[in-house]
Image (tube, rainbow, N blue to C red):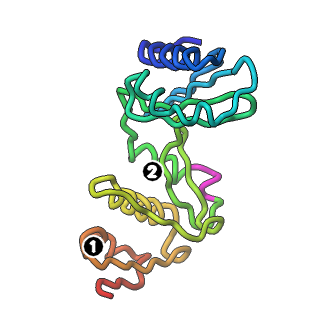
Amino acid sequence: MELSQEQLEVSKAFLMKLIGLGIKAELIRVEAGPVVCGYHFKLDYAVPINKILKKSEDFALAACVEKVSISRVEGEIVIYAANRNRALIDLKSYMYWFCTNKKVSEMQIPIPIGVDTLGNNTAIDLIDQPHILLAGQTGSGKSVFEAAILSCLSLAKSPAELKIHLVDTKTLDLPLFRSLPHVINTIETL
């Protein structure tokens, strides 16, 4: 397995931290994504996962990364760490994938999610998950995500297939979408 310099440094830091905790481990593979890498370790013996989970801040500090997330997957642990150099995700190429993908076209109400940790394009069907709660701090991209959802939906479904009711109490995020033929009602005050 060919690792970048950053992946090599981070995986060594994680291995040293595991050794420091008295845990023998072997790096099995690194799943590299545009924003996050998953470092898969095979442990020498059964270790209570809580012993490792409680040390997530220590792993982040050891590897000089903002934060890590640790999970157990089929006999191994995976430590996810944000890349120092994160790749941009291109909305144009994502929208092309969204509008031409066979699985997405079979969904009744496809919702664009973006890319997963490995950089694979993803979407969900709103029929399988009838509610979405979109939350986050100011400037985290909520309005961009709303615009991406409406843009992708209006490209993937015709006005005969999809009707949209807009509720935009701030009248900041959705004015551009009022003129879509899919929009049958816009509520701006409650």
Question: Could you tell me residue 138's position as x and y percent?
Answer: 28, 58
Out of 100 and 129, give the one closest to the viewer: 129
Q: Residue furthest bottom?
A: 190
Q: How many badges with numbers are in the image?
A: 2
Up/down of 93 relative to 145, above or below = above
Question: Could you tell me residue 175's position as x and y percent?
Answer: 27, 73
The segment highlighted magenta reads 101-105
Q: Residue at x 58, y 20 (%)?
A: 21
* Disc 1 target residue: 175
Q: Is residue 42 magenta?
A: no
* Disc 2 target residue: 95
Out of 45 and 131, give the one closest to the viewer: 45
Q: Residues within 10 Å of mark 2 (few under 14, many from 20)?
A: many
Out of 42 and 173, give the one closest to the viewer: 42
At mark 1, the secondary structure is helix
N-terminal of the pair, mark 2 or mark 1, is: 2
The span from disc 2 to disc 1 (Cα, nearest Å) is 21 Å
Residue type at the position of mark 2: Met
Q: Residues within 10 Å of mark 1 (few under 14, many from 20)?
A: few
Describe residue 156's horizontal placement relative to residue 61 as left or right.
right
Residue type at the position of mark 1: Pro
Describe residue 170's horizontal placement relative to residue 106 as left or right.
left
Q: In which quadrant of the rendered image does the N terminus lie?
A: top right
Describe residue 183's horizontal placement relative to residue 189 as left or right.
right
Describe residue 39's horizontal placement relative to residue 178 as left or right.
right
Q: Residue at x 60, y 55 (%)?
A: 104
